[in-house]
Image: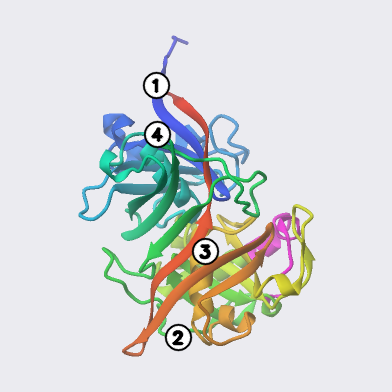
Amino acid sequence: MSFQAQLRIPATYMRGGTSKGVFFSLDDLPPEAQQPGRERDALLMRVIGSPDPYGKQIDGMGGATSSTSKTVIVSPSRRPGHDIDYLFGQVSIDRPFVDWSGNCGNLSAAVGAFAIAKGLMPFERLPENGMATVRIWQANIGKTIIAEIPIRNGEVQELGDFELDGVTFPAAEISLAFLDPAAGEEGEGGAMFPTGKVVDDLDVPGIGVIQATMIDAGIPTIFVDAESIGFKGTELQDDINGDAEILKRFESIRAHGALRMGLITSLDQAVARQHTPKVAFVSKPQAYTSSSGKSVTPGDVDLLVRALSMGKLHHAMMGTAAVAIGTAAAVPGTLVNTAAGGGQRESVCFGHPSGTLRVGASVEHVDGEWRVTRAVMSRSARVLMEGVVCVPKTW
């Protein structure tokens, strides 16, 4: 076999929230990958190490979980009133595709810091010390995210004492505000509840008719009551992810919910849309021990939520799903709101497998429809490695 050199592409490996991924500046990508399409998808899959029939992504940068099989492309924004454009690609682990159908709320926390470090932000908008406000256009879903990034001596402050359950070490706090995060393109808003109801009867073959709150805020999400599908709501990853039959049932709920929400037109399309919608189950506050050994008591939280991502129970909580949780909790009558005790709420603290998280949302009822104007949460981010990523030239 003749010798073949590898292509070296500038890249940064970053943690954002409870996820991590490979970040690129758009202009650093090969010309054929600077546009959407087959070449871009093939490059990102090769970078991450997919598709991998072994499910390990050993020959790539992925970590063989939904939280670590991620890519981000950032560029100066062409949209008025915004600083940068952010495009997220969720790379399938064992299948040959990249899902562009939604955002990653966790990695959203790292986008602003990456843009500042790479000189993609206007210099005049950056303080020497203080908070830099980064106006992010989330290109996948056509929404605005406002990130408040701490700056010290002209550089992004990454280290601090903010603790985030699901992340081992503390870091500097980053505040994220998701503006008008419900369904709709180009910031115009849309049907937050695609079926027009806050609770629906969802008929899932093999499971039966179950109640579901189907909401599109942050990311399309299907919420069901834990007890109605045979769970307590205190489950951890090992209780779910090792049972193929349980995962198959959740995927069936996800597919039928996606069809009901109008996200797909036939059930077989769900296979190629793994990133969205999410499916989650909720319960009233209960005591449990998190995956790190932390004790969570009923008094610590308003409700419990477990969510699946890319076919597996998430180790903590996806940032976009947290937006959906906060929004649904603020709307009286949803399953999330009911689990939290009912009434109108501006914020909730929920328990997830790794601990707890607080998220706030502002909603309003206008002309018979619910609308969310803003959802807020805190995350952190840190550069793990920077330099170049190497891929075969014939990716």
Real-space CA distance between mark 4 and mark 1, rounded to the nearest whole angstrom: 11 Å
Residue drawn 29% across the image and 65% down it = 185
Real-space CA distance between mark 3 and mark 1, rounded to the nearest whole angstrom: 36 Å
Total number of numbered labels?
A: 4
Kindly check if marks 2 and 4 are in contact, taking CB atoms under 8 A apart as contact: no
- Earlier-in-chain disc, 3 versus 4: 4
Kindly check if marks 4 and 1 are in contact, taking CB atoms under 8 A apart as contact: no
Asked if the magenta segment contains residue 89, the reply would be: no
What residue range appears in magenta? 229-249
Residue with the mark numbered 4? 43
Q: Residues within 10 Å of mark 2 (few under 14, many from 20)?
A: some
Amino acid carrying label 3: it is: Ala
Real-space CA distance between mark 1 and mark 2, rounded to the nearest whole angstrom: 51 Å
Name the mark on residue 321: 3
Given residues 58 and 166, the one toward you in this image is 166
Residue with the mark numbered 2? 197
Which image quarter: residue 308? Answer: bottom right
Amino acid carrying label 1: it is: Leu
Between marks 2 and 3 in the image, the one whose residue lies nearer the viewer: 3
Question: Percent from the top left, x then y, of residue 247?
Answer: 65, 61
Q: Residues within 10 Å of mark 4 (few under 14, many from 20)?
A: many
- Earlier-in-chain disc, 4 versus 1: 1
| Element at label 3 | helix
